[in-house]
Image (spheres, rainbow, N blue to C red):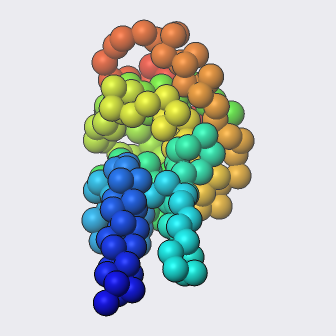
Amino acid sequence: MKRSHFGILATVAALGLFACERSSVEFASTKAPNVGGVQYAAVAHTAVLEGVTVQRAVLPQGDEGVDGKAVFAKSCAACHQLHGNGLPGAFPPLAGSPYVVGDNVERLTAIMIYGLQGPITVKGTVYNNVMTPWGSILKDEELAAVATYVRSAWGNTASAVGVDQITKTRQKYGTRGLFTIQELGEEK
């Protein structure tokens, strides 16, 4: 009788230990049923109970603790879609877009931080919608991670974007409203 009580107590203690080590973090996954919702990530932990080892998994966080693909799925995919092809006639593609893969990284970061309004031509199609300004919503690390992700996803092969580039863009433009593409320079 004492042995079975010990097993029950050990199980309860282990469950309590795991519950105490849980912390909530936001993340998005294309496989999660609640994309972008609050999920729980566990701190790596191993417990040994009566000779049985129980190990908790840790969700991947990516470089610098920010997963650009996950932030993109949560914040950008509604318009630009998970495949980066946008929505025809409404939101431009990021896959193969010269605004994404071009050398003018400042233009890309300015669009992400401050948003964009008015017509823009991407890959021969004119889009005339509003891009959400993400600068007051996302942290600089998240913006840099998303910029790096979109510059390297869907066949894009451009260089990474560092947090320092986001900071530099913020310093240059300060607080302002939406840009037009004419203000930032159109891709020819």
Percent x, y for residue 39?
A: 33, 58
Q: In this view, does 174 lie to the left or right of 46?
A: left
Q: How many labels does the image show?
A: 0
* Residue at the image point whose x is 40% and y is 68% from the top: 14
Percent x, y for residue 161?
A: 64, 35
Q: In this view, does 153 lie to the left or right of 41?
A: right
**Is residue 123 at all visible to an observer of this figure?**
no
* Residue at the image point whose x is 43% and y is 48% from the top: 71
Viewport quadrant of the N terminus: bottom left
**Camera-side residue: 132 or 32?**
32
Residue 60: quarter of image: bottom right
- Above-or-below relation of 2 to 26: below
Percent x, y for residue 21?
A: 41, 53
* Residue at the image point whose x is 36% and y is 66% from the top: 13
Q: Residue furthest front?
A: 2
Q: Is residue 160 left or right of residue 67?
A: right
Viewport quadrant of the C terminus: top right
**Camera-side residue: 139 or 154?**
139
**Camera-side residue: 134 or 186?**
134
* Residue at the image point whose x is 42% and y is 9% from the top: 174
**Is residue 21 at all visible to an observer of this figure?**
yes
